[in-house]
Amino acid sequence: MDERFAPDGTARRSSAILSELLDGIGAEGLEERQRAAEAEILTMGITFTVYSDGDNIDRAWPFDVIPRIIDGSEWDGVEAGLVQRLRALNAFIDDLYNDQRIIADGVFPAELLADSANYRPECRGVHPAHGVWAHISGSDLVRHDDGQFYVLEDNLRVPSGVSYMLENRAVTKRVFPDLFERQSIRPVDNYTDELNRLLVSIAPGAKRNPQVAVLTPGVFNSAYFEHSFLAQRMGAELVEGDDLVVGVDGVVSMRTIEGLAPVDVIYRRIDDLFLDPEVFRSDSLIGVPGLMRAWREGTVAIANAPGAGVADDKVVYAWVPDIIRYYTGDEPLIPNVPTWRCMYADERRHVLDNLRELVVKPANESGGYGIVIGDRADDATLRECAAAIEADPRNWVAQPILALSTVPTIVGDGEIGQRHVDLRPFILTGERSFVTPGGLTRVALPEGSLVVNSSQGGGSKDTWVVDVEGGGA
């Protein structure tokens, strides 16, 4: 699907703004704006890290200046679907660590939980504030040829990318200031205010002015730019594991030049297994000894909660429509992509017989790693994929190769081509829900590519949710 033009060649309603923009400035003006945006990115120090042969390489954030535009009336339905999905997923996580009603009622298989790489028995019996475990989520959406948005996967552990969404908007405002004066483009700038409000709301004892800290693995982490960005925007402390200490009374404190200061809420950007060497990996050098004890005792809140990743599994994903029906009584507002689960013999046989026509994914990888796109893989890769599926069926799912929508993208010297995109909106869930209008649009820059991850050569765009007939901010 071409998001700019309908099949008959007419501009879609939401893209009239884009047509006006591109026709008005021409190829030379577009290239000038692109150079200005890239210079702004360098000046602002917006980078991401690529791990290559053991070296950490910082690169300027890849950005395409042509915005992606989504009609506000369409977005309202997407937003409602994401709120529904995350409410159901949080109810599911809370149930798994407590009563497990969904298993007792035969809706979710017990053996799938038993084999889960992200289920943490250490979290059994915990009741986080508001029953929410995944406070900050990033659900990846794709638009198919039928025009419908589908949820491709859920990211519930430590989803990243929101800082790039915010910086994309800041850069676009600088290079197209006139458009923001004339158009009803919904703002995203209030995300950090909403995030801070959420984190404050989960502080133990409803403390009025709680101390919030962002826990980072350190400067060598690929998302460190985002960790420091969010801490600065929220006025929170950016800390590493060595900066925190848990007392015998279960109180978490951070080391300061004036002594120990209590910490009430931790926005953690560290994977579960490295959070607390007393409970998980004893060799972790980036965690905080005693942190799980403090969390279980209720002296500190952690977002996202340990164990939330049990629902961030590409096999569990296949059950999300049933999960939504079970906990809400309603039909899903945004559909899943059809998914074959290799743990079942009949579905596994279908996958093995049709590898060339499918996308095969490992259950718990991220960043596009481990994915095999059947029609682009050589015979040796497909044989290796088949062997991996046979060896560990629980770890694999497969989906059809979707014809992802395309949007106009600069492909060199002001020339415009069509490139495939996905979208990662960010959802905050607590006492109330908040969804970023739009999100991080990621672009597969090589022609014909479906891989949008920046670590694998992808780029990004600002995403405009536009109230075409007025009403936006």
Image (spheres, helix red, strand yellow):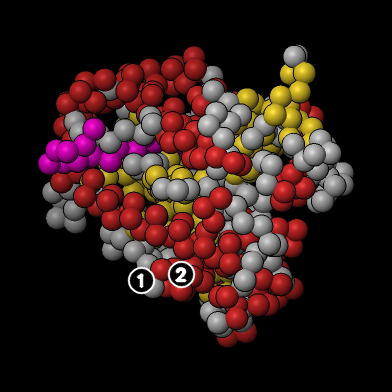
Q: Position of residue 194 (x, y in %)?
A: 43, 36
Q: Is residue 291 left or right of residue 10?
A: right
Q: Is residue 166 magenta?
A: no
Q: The N terminus appears in which quarter of the rendering? A: bottom left
C-beta proximity under 8 Å, tags 2 and 1:
no
The mark found on residue 167 in the picture is none
**Percent position (x, y) of residue 228?**
59, 26
Residue drawn at 33 percent across, 55 percent down? 80
Q: Nearer the viewer, mark 2 or mark 1?
A: 2
Q: Splitting the image into 4 quarters, where does residue 174 fall?
A: top left
Judged from the image, the secondary structure of the residue bearing numbered disc 2 is: helix
**Disc number for residue 331:** 1
- Residue lying at 81% horizontally and 35% vertically, measured from the top left: 247
Q: Is residue 7 above or below residue 221?
A: below
For residue 327, the mark is 2
Is 75 drawn above or below residue 174 in the view shown?
below
Q: Is residue 175 above or below residue 350?
A: above
* Residues shaded magenta: 453-473
View extreme (bottom): residue: 346
* Number of marks in the rendered image: 2
Q: What amino acid type should be assigned to the residue bearing mark 1?
A: Glu
Is residue 66 rendered to the left or right of residue 363? left
Nearer the observer, 378 or 37: 37
The extreme right residue here reads 283
Q: Is residue 457 magenta?
A: yes
The answer to whether one can see residue 376 in this image is no
